[in-house]
Image (cartoon, rainbow, N blue to C red):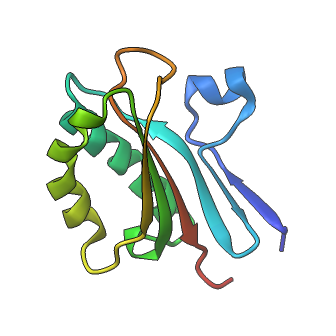
Amino acid sequence: MARIRRISSGGEFEAKVGYCRAVVAGGFVHVAGTVGQGEDVLSQCQSALDIIGKALAEVGGSFADVVRVNYYLPDAKEFAPCWPLLAETFGGNPPAATMIETGLIDPKYRIEIEVTALAPPP
């Protein structure tokens, strides 16, 4: 079995920028920073979580396996509306988390989410 498994979403920016949606290595699934589609922070948050959930499922994992999450927002004040959605997503398995206020690649994006999860056993 390969030591490293790369998971591609097939998105246009993967080839342009030179990255993949997720990498399974060293017993972990490292999911790239993910932005979602939508008009506001809450819809973008849900969309990003859907994309992340799909990547985790592709390797046989779920949000219950997430051990670390980083949230990046251009405006920290927009984070609070996402809290109920995040609490529901992670349920009884909350990961260690960090929220950083920073610029994103395009001003239309209101949140970017990056996770690290335990990889399922081979």
- Horizontal and vertical percent for residue 59? 57, 66
The answer to which image quadrant residue 13 occupies is top right
Between residue 77 and residue 71, name the one nearer to us. 77
Q: Residue at x 22, y 64 (%)?
A: 87
Q: Is residue 82 above or below residue 68?
A: above
Between residue 51 and residue 42, name the one nearer to us. 42
- Horizontal and vertical percent for residue 14? 65, 30
Between residue 102 and residue 25, name the one nearer to us. 102
Q: Is residue 71 left or right of residue 30?
A: left
Q: Is residue 55 left or right of residue 85?
A: right
Q: Is residue 68 left or right of residue 111?
A: right
How many dots with numbers?
0
Q: Quadrant of the C terminus?
A: bottom right
Q: Residue at x 83, y 74 (%)?
A: 1
Q: Residue at x 34, y 49 (%)?
A: 50
- Horizontal and vertical percent for residue 12? 58, 23
Q: Residue at x 70, y 24 (%)?
A: 17
The answer to which image quadrant residue 43 occupies is top left
- Horizontal and vertical percent for residue 62? 42, 70
Q: Is residue 51 left or right of residue 43?
A: right
Q: Is residue 85 above or below residue 121?
A: above
